[in-house]
Amino acid sequence: GQQLNQSPQSMFIQEGEDVSMNCTSSSIFNTWLWYKQDPGEGPVLLIALYKAGELTSNGRLTAQFGITRKDSFLNISASIPSDVGIYFCAGVYGGSQGNLIFGKGTKLSVKP
Amino acid sequence: GAVVSQHPSWVICKSGTSVKIECRSLDFQATTMFWYRQFPKQSLMLMATSNEGSKATYEQGVEKDKFLINHASLTLSTLTVTSAHPEDSSFYICSARVEGYGYTFGSGTRLTVV
């Protein structure tokens, strides 16, 4: 079945540093989504990518959908303490009624 | 827009009892809702897909008689954990697919079975 390999598993960075994380798969996905989850909360959508090669920004966040539709990266520039949380990539498969499959997450810790 | 309201946010129940979790779409109609389970420090695992007016589709390994799903209206889906046991303790999250937006998630329900 489909699997998403997300890396790194965790990151410890200094406030102000840039962050990069990525997801890869052997399967092709229609859509890639990036979510952030705070402790005890549901995931919150950060960026949605629909077209191969698409590069999209949301404030300090930038994500790109790989040209092969098998990978994506998320960059966070000039990190701040509130960026702390777990970031998940998710791929949509199965056509118009597609389901989501999640990566295992990247836990981000930011030191002030 | 595209808000899913999930209740309760946390619940503690005795082993052997049943617990119902509700998810409501507040400003849109959700033909399809998804139910996930998340163990500590792990990712979200899809349990079942809930379709309004029809039976839910369960993922392999998920007991449909234990996790009862009802999607009787376009704005409400419920998950009932029947005869709960400590191993059912987990974080349960619902989600809905929103046209032109993507997938929006509820805030989750922390279930603890004692």
Image: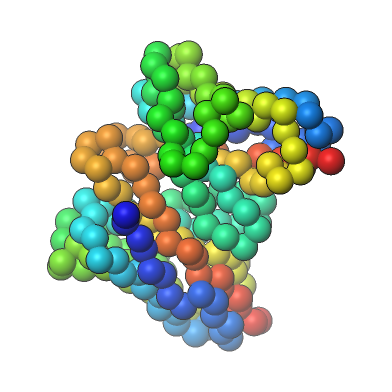
Q: Is residue B85 left or right of residue A35?
A: right
Q: Is residue A83 left or right of residue A102?
A: right
The residue lying at 35 percent from left, 35 percent from top is B98
Q: Quadrant of residue B13?
A: top right
The residue lying at 22 percent from left, 36 percent from top is A96
Residue B38 location in percent, x, y? 58, 50
The residue lying at 40 percent from left, 30 percent from top is B57
**Along the line of sight, which residue is nearer the eye, B30 or B26?**
B30
**Along the line of sight, which residue is nearer the eye, A45 or B64?**
B64
Residue B62 location in percent, x, y? 52, 38
Q: Quadrant of the N terminus of chain B?
A: top left
Q: Compared with residue A67, is residue A111 higher up or lower down, i.e. above or below?
A: below
Residue B46 location in percent, x, y? 46, 44
Q: How is the image coloured?
A: rainbow
Q: Quadrant of residue B41?
A: bottom right
Residue B85 location in percent, x, y? 75, 38
The residue lying at 50 percent from left, 70 percent from top is A106
Q: Quadrant of the C terminus of chain B?
A: top right
Q: Is residue A62 visible?
A: no
Q: Quadrant of residue A15?
A: bottom right
